[in-house]
Amino acid sequence: DVVDAVRSALTGGPLAGRRVLVTSGPTHEPIDPVRYIANRSSGAQGTAIAEALRALGADVVFVTGPAEVARPEGVEVIEVVTATQMRAAVLGALPVDAGVFAAAVADWRVASASDSKIKKQNGQLPVLEFAENPDILAEVSRLPEGRPGLVVGFAAETDDVVAHATAKRVRKGCDWIVANDVSPATGIMGGSENAVVLISENGSEAWPRMGKREVARRLALRIAAALGAG
Amino acid sequence: DVVDAVRSALTGGPLAGRRVLVTSGPTHEPIDPVRYIANRSSGAQGTAIAEALRALGADVVFVTGPAEVARPEGVEVIEVVTATQMRAAVLGALPVDAGVFAAAVADWRVASASDSKIKKQNGQLPVLEFAENPDILAEVSRLPEGRPGLVVGFAAETDDVVAHATAKRVRKGCDWIVANDVSPATGIMGGSENAVVLISENGSEAWPRMGKREVARRLALRIAAALGAG
């Protein structure tokens, strides 16, 4: 907010001189030249996090898929479409002090993507073969050299949020998971509010439901504290 | 444009008292609560057609999927997401004097769509079973009662545009097909220009490349002429 921005301008902010990577938005995976698989991420939470980190003085590299919301101001923006492109952009942006992986990266791409439009033929249905996309969060979390000092993943769950996200933290090798419930009934996906649980090695911490900008502000302050800059 | 709008305001326009349906935009077909299959239609051409018909005095019903571009002014807008929903909206909007089916309706939906987020599990890949979507253009073209006097379909092709579109006109039973080449190299999909071929029982007529608004204006004038209102 304004107070943070003014403080950062005057003092450099607690994250001055720190480089932080944020991924955001969906990825789109082509089926053919006109069709693709997408997901419902608007990019609102990732964009708010980039802005909050910037407000604390960080140099932010923002790697975004084709998101609906306007790009954040004052940060380096790298636009990508697919998960494969996002991986390349992320690895190219390293080294960073912290990485926040808020993008909703497609788990799978279509291995049999066609160069020409798949035609509708006499009731025949298409067969889509899938291939697993690179797991960017796990790869960065396990980098033998150049791993960010803090790696924050996100988990969008529709049931057993804490259990799934706690398991995900261990499986990916990241430091924190910001988990939320994206069941349609919550209205969070595409909405302006979020209700998150922060999972770390110390367990889980449920935050009250609040605006996505406030979630971003709190998370940015926690990141600053974890980097010893708070 | 302004001249048309002023003329319509003064005289009622050549399509005054005529009701025209326009479909536009993509459809989204859910895979699970966070993933869906989409297509690259921006809705720009369909929106321009609705506006051009309105400028000639028509009462326009505009049935749109989740399109990027702003909705047209001065028309009845019905928002839908899936092809199944679009079919219901179209049938509910009849009778009309003419129907322009510019939407990029998904040919298939996911028959096995899941109510909870499909999890990534040990390298296992998802199996998506597809079902054929309703063919709205063919259904309306073949209505035994209440068929619009003029049915105009669209064909987005990536190769053999005229041959594919000519066959499509006969297969669907519509009166005209507005065909275009959406190969990535043309830059038409998502761009501001279009190069179309108008296919009718009289053969094919290639229009020069022009702005989507100008394509819309010419098409609206042709529709007015065909309805005996030109």
Image (cartoon, coloured by chain):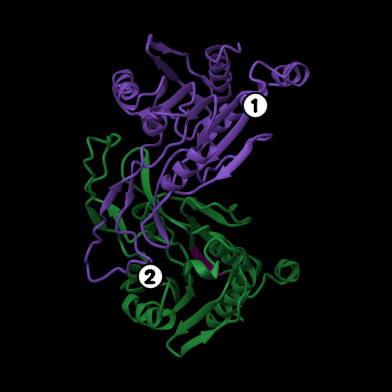
Chain colours: A purple, B green
Above/below status of A148 relative to B212: above
Above/below status of A179 relative to A60: above
Q: Secondary structure at mark 2?
A: loop
**Residue at point 54% right, 14% down?**
A222
Amino acid type at image mark 1 = Arg
Say whether residue B57 is visible. no
As drawn, is A118 to the left or to the right of A28?
left
Q: Residues within 10 Å of mark 1 (few under 14, many from 20)?
A: many
> On the image, which quarter does residue B222 sit in?
bottom right
Return the mark for residue B146.
2
Q: Nearer the viewer, residue A4 or B18?
A: A4
**Distance (Cα) linking label 2 and label 1:** 60 Å
As drawn, is A35 to the left or to the right of B55?
left
Q: Residues within 10 Å of mark 2 (few under 14, many from 20)?
A: some
From the top left corner, tell me how far across and down residue B42 is, in percent.
52, 57
Above/below status of A178 relative to B230: above
**Residue at point 33% right, 54% down?**
B84
Tell me the chain of label 2: B
From the top left corner, tell me how far across and down residue B162 is, in percent.
43, 82
Tell me the chain of label 1: A
**Residue at point 43% right, 40% down?**
A40
Magenta region: B18-22
Residue B20 part of the magenta segment: yes
Amino acid type at image mark 2 = Gly
From the top left corner, tell me how far across and down residue B209 is, in percent.
60, 77
